[in-house]
Image (cartoon, coloured by chain):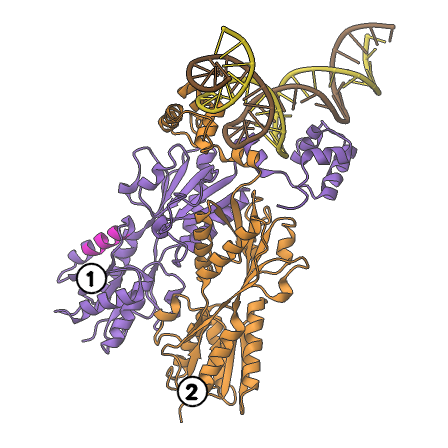
Chain colours: A purple, B orange, C yellow, D brown
Amino acid sequence: MPAVSRPTSKDVAQEAGVSQSTVSLVLGGKWSGRVSPATARNVRSAAERLGYRPNQAARNLRLGTTRTVLLMVPTLSAPFFGPVYTGAARVAARHGFGVVVSTWPDDAAGPADSPFGSDEAIDGVLASSMAAGALAEFRGTPAVMLDSGPDDRPGDRVPTVDFGVADGMRAIAGHLAELGHRRFGHVAAAVDQWTFHARAEALAAAVAGLPGGALTRARCAIDVTSARDAAARLLTGPARPTALVCDDDLIAAGAYKAARALGLDVPADLSVTGFDDVLLATALEPELTTVRLPAEELGAQGMTALLDLLAGHRPAPRVLPGELVVRDSTAPPRG
Amino acid sequence: MPAVSRPTSKDVAQEAGVSQSTVSLVLGGKWSGRVSPATARNVRSAAERLGYRPNQAARNLRLGTTRTVLLMVPTLSAPFFGPVYTGAARVAARHGFGVVVSTWPDDAAGPADSPFGSDEAIDGVLASSMAAGALAEFRGTPAVMLDSGPDDRPGDRVPTVDFGVADGMRAIAGHLAELGHRRFGHVAAAVDQWTFHARAEALAAAVAGLPGGALTRARCAIDVTSARDAAARLLTGPARPTALVCDDDLIAAGAYKAARALGLDVPADLSVTGFDDVLLATALEPELTTVRLPAEELGAQGMTALLDLLAGHRPAPRVLPGELVVRDSTAPPRG
DNA sequence: GGATCGCCGTCATACGTATTACCGAACCAG
DNA sequence: CTGGTTCGGTAATACGTATGACGGCGATCC
């Protein structure tokens, strides 16, 4: 608490020798034919002199809007969600909105004081990668769901922006099939989110449609060592796969480790694919063939939809296609 | 805008058949001897029935506090700052505070509408990795600076939480020297932040203090390909270094690529070190020797200091030591 | 039995802003 | 000179909450 409290519009009024209403009119920009240019200048300079900044709480109360939206993501520690925030914040800022982040309380080990961040004053919520239950908390608040599955959606219609993960996975399977692969291993994330279910399903369907196609699967946490172990299980099992399809770039890094430990060269002896195309994908050796999910675009489009919704429109659902990015981790199988 | 607006405390009062003041007293928990238990129960159940949630804007206005702090970070797209947020948010939540994030406007390509996110109502600000100029915007708002240099600090005393990056860099140099290295290459981030200046300085001093020590340097952006090129320049120059000290784990990934392109094995032919110990460090092959900077702890300690400051105390400056983590990317030089 | 006291609650107000309704003066036409 | 119109500005109010001042009422005490 500063020794001297912030100046209010009343202080500015006194300084300028006018009334508070006039100050508000001038600073609000609505003084077409209400205030003389001279007075306006006077008010502005007084405000400048005092370093006046309007009290947001009072504005919010008066206007009934906070121009702030809540972005709910599972975590910001994973590499994927930073860009989502960046995209969302960019378009929000362009419309004079702020973004407050709330992470999913999986780390809510402490006293469960505040369900989501704190009980903010929010105009809307952008919920990423989570089930409908979480939104119940915000009943009545306009919301847009990001990267969610059909099952996750509440009964009432909530606009959505999704990735075309199934198409992405089909593209991967197609790419590998074209190279000649038939025996696939799926290193799957043991996470109960729609996006992973969709990936698994799409891969299974694609392999099933392939003459002579075979698919084995191992589950792991989204974490390098867990992924390495799962991949090793697949590679040491019967009928070793010639390609490992990973649910995630980080998991692919684990697959690299397993391959190396077994003396298998990627991609000569084993093809590996990732998903998401985070920074890591190009940092690995060899660079990873993966599906690029435009995370920043997801945030941007989601925010656009939410702002539409706040403006009274009903944005149509959108699907952002994932793009297959072929790099150096895939090649025809040996022999 | 929902068809029916949110219920207010007045609505709850009507539902419960009491006055608004009573509702506020009960829900505020300050009804020791003011309200009978029966009435309190009644009010609570009415609030529950209507799904009442207090209007934060009104609370904020009345109480003069928002219980919200602003976290300023350069970006959330880089892997380092996510954990900073996580740590800060964790301790904030524990004290009933919310966190709103604002990223540094390096991507403020659009109209520079809003200087920082939007002009939020803030109790305090936590500024990470930035110069004092940015804080000028918030003159009068309690602030804590994170990972800042002595030069960055404003004249008035602002509490700080820093990393011991110089010690960390000395640890790296010592580790490499002990392995027998004498010719060092520094792949340096071309970023004008104190932390990188400090790293360069500490490395230079350490090498200078080493009999027969030699140091060359190349600058690059924090980006794999740029780092690869810079590393390649060092490795193809005269008196090739036997160890590359990188300012950052991501840069180290670039160094790996350069080494591989030149047919050099890490660590047999070339030792490589990183800095920060982000997820990437253990995803790489070989796993990266680096200095662990406890990013989450930085956020947590910074928030603790800020809350102290808001409570009227003067938190002492803190320094979080970086810890050398020796993995598989360093070895004695050949020969 | 009347004054006092504790218990339960309500009234009124203030926080700082945006906006609507209003009002005096000046100006203009007739 | 008068009635209307425009210009330039002010007074008043509402947003929803928290809280200090106040008051009714039954019980208690002498």
A248 within the magenta span = no
Relative placement, left or right, of C17 versus B250 is: right
Cα distance between the residues tagged 2 and 1:
40 Å
Q: Which of A199 and B242 is in front in this view?
A: B242
Could you tell me if residue B69 is visible in this image?
yes
Residue A320 seen: no
First to last magenta residue range: A196-204
Q: Which residue is drawn at 19% across and 53% down?
A: A205
Nearer the camera: disc 2 or disc 1:
2
Residue kind at label 2, given as amino acid type: Leu
Q: Name the residue under label 2.
A: B179
Q: Is the magenta stretch mostly helix, strand or loop?
A: helix
Crowding near pointer 2: few (<14 within 10 Å), some, many (20+)? some
| Badge 2: chain ID | B
Estimate the x, y position of residue B161 in percent, counting from the top left. Answer: 54, 62
Name the residue at 31% across, 68% down.
Answer: A253
Closer to the camera in the image, A25 or A139: A139
Splitting the image into 4 quarters, where does residue A158 fall?
top left
Label 1 chain ID: A
In the figure, residue A54 lies in which quadrant?
top right
Q: Eyeballing the image, is B243 above or below B130? A: below
Q: Name the residue under label 1.
A: A218
* Quadrant into which the C terminus of chain A falls: bottom left
Question: For the residue labelled by badge 1, is the local secondary structure a helix, a strand or a loop?
Answer: strand
